[in-house]
Amino acid sequence: MEKRIRLCAALAMVLLLTACGQAPAEHEREERLTVVATVFPAYDFARAAGGELAEVRLLLPPGAESHSYEPTPADILAVQERYLFLYLGGESDAWVETILESVDMQGEALRMVDCVDLLEEETVEGMEDHEGHDHDHAEGPGLGEVVGYDEHVWTSPKNAAAITRAVGDRLAELDPANAGTYAANTEGYAARIEARDREVEDVFAGVEDRTMVFGDRFPGCSTQTEPSAATIAFLTDKVREEGIPTVWYIEFSNHLVADSIAEAAGVKTALFHTCHNVSTDELEAGATYVSLMEQNLETLRENL
């Protein structure tokens, strides 16, 4: 409730600001297309597709969590005034829909989840309800039951290439005079992503057991959700029994769960970067989706 009140207050401030002055006319806009993206993958795909022809802004600050992010009035204005707004869609950034329903969008919006087919998330052995996480099941979902859809669509390089192409197509529609440049930019970057995907396939082709254990957040849960002691025990036993050499964790995790499982099983831990967001240092160093996937490739080769 408190979060909703703060969001409503921000929206009220935006309405007040827009009422005090007219929105900029089309000819007053900058020559380059202006794009706002909520999360790093969308930001990276847009700047690759747009190149010098687009000005792309990352809405979420480095290290911010999209699930619990609270936009400022400046953020809402930025969304309202851009030619193109890119966001994930779905439950992960439900606050975006509230903004879009409350402001007069001057440009277009594109949801990443609409660019690809979503994978179903099923309950597998060892998964169970977590304290404080509400499922619509009296006794919890059964084994093999679909509990939702994976909205982290960019983690598949194939999807990332498809989303890049969708962004490039939308930019070309908005700026048809430069459609050829957007197409060349898009295909060049999509090809680099697909090359990394083939390398990942090559890495796993030489691995007999492709099981990866992540001692981290669980599907559909917030960053604060922790697995139960029973789940940790199950994962520890699985690592031991199957001889899994590494327990993985993701960026911005405290990796306490991974450390606990790895210590009990006598194995190592390693970072797998999902590219959901980046740190200030990574952003300033010029990190891209491709560079982070290359980092993952090296880590996979060393730890599988």
Image (tube, rainbow, N blue to C red):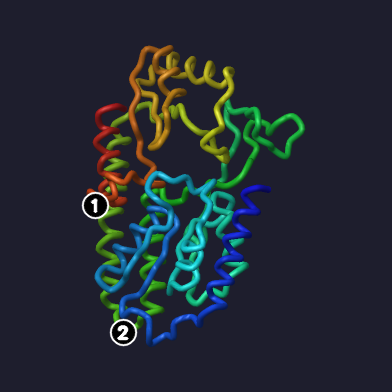
Residue 180: x %, y % from top left: 28, 77
Q: Nearer the viewer, residue 256 or 121?
A: 256
Q: Quadrant of residue 142?
A: top right
Mark 1 is surrounded, within 10 Å at the Cα level, by few (under 14), some (14 to 19) or many (20 or more) other residues, namely: few
> Mark 2 highlights which residue?
177
Under circle 1, the secondary element is loop
Decide: is 193 above or below 188: above
Total marks shown come to 2
Residue at x 36% of width, y 50% of height: 157
Under circle 2, the secondary element is helix
Residue 95: x %, y % from top left: 58, 55
**Looking at numbered disc 2 in the image, what kind of residue is underneath it?**
Ala
Per the rendering, the mark at residue 107 is: none
Residue 216 falls left or right of residue 273: right
Mark 2 is surrounded, within 10 Å at the Cα level, by few (under 14), some (14 to 19) or many (20 or more) other residues, namely: few
**Looking at numbered disc 1 in the image, what kind of residue is underneath it?**
Gly
> Mark 1 highlights which residue?
286
Residue 204: x %, y % from top left: 32, 35
Residue 7: x %, y % from top left: 60, 56
Residue 64 falls left or right of residue 246: right
Q: Disc 2 vs disc 1: Cβ atoms closer than 8 Å?
A: no
Quadrant holding the C terminus: top left
Point out the tag, 2 or 1, that comes first from the N-terminus.
Answer: 2
Residue at x 29% of width, y 27% of height: 303
Residue 288 falls left or right of residue 212: left
Q: Quadrant of residue 43?
A: bottom left
Residue at x 48% of width, y 80% of height: 23
The CA distance from mark 2 to mark 1 is 29 Å
Say which of marks 2 and 1 sits in front: 1
